[in-house]
Image (tube, grey):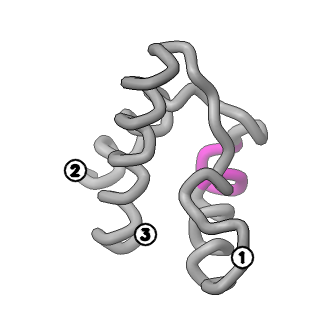
């Protein structure tokens, strides 16, 4: 995934954790507007989420943030 979406995922996770607590869950749709205006990027994130990491639809925001940070290093 590109740097821009990685930063957005981290920001969204941080915001959700700050407002709803450490156990808040979210789906990969949380990083996109309700309107599907970038299907290529949506599929890229969905592929990362579903195929690469074998994640269920809803995951803890902290887990997603940690995965993005680890993938960035690798």
Residue pictured at 44% horizontal, 24% vertical: 19
Mark carried by residue 73: 2
The secondary structure type at the circle numbered 2 is: helix
When asked about the image quadrant of residue 38, the answer is bottom right
Q: Say whether disc 1 or disc 2 marks the residue closer to the N-terminus.
A: 1
C-beta proximity under 8 Å, tags 1 and 2 = no
C-beta proximity under 8 Å, tags 1 and 3 = no
Q: Residues within 10 Å of mark 2 (few under 14, many from 20)?
A: few
Query: In the rendered view of the protein, which quadrant contains the N terminus?
Result: bottom left
Q: With 20 as the anchor, is 34 left or right in this view? A: right
Mark carried by residue 35: 1
Q: Main secondary structure of the magenta part?
A: helix
User: Which residue is nearer to you in this view: 59 or 20?
Assistant: 20
Q: Which residues are magenta?
A: 49-54
Q: Say whether disc 2 or disc 3 marks the residue closer to the N-terminus.
A: 3
Which residue is denoted by mark 3 in the rendering? Answer: 1
When asked about the image quadrant of residue 57, the answer is top right
């Amino acid at each position: 995934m590109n740097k821009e979406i990685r930063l957005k995922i981290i920001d969204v996770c941080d915001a959700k954790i700050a407002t709803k607590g450490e156990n808040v869950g979210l789906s990969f749709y949380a990083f996109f507007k309700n309107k599907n205006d970038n299907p290529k990027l949506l599929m890229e994130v969905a592929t990362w989420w579903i195929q690469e990491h074998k994640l269920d639809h809803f995951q803890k925001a902290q887990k997603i943030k940690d995965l993005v940070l680890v993938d960035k290093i690798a």
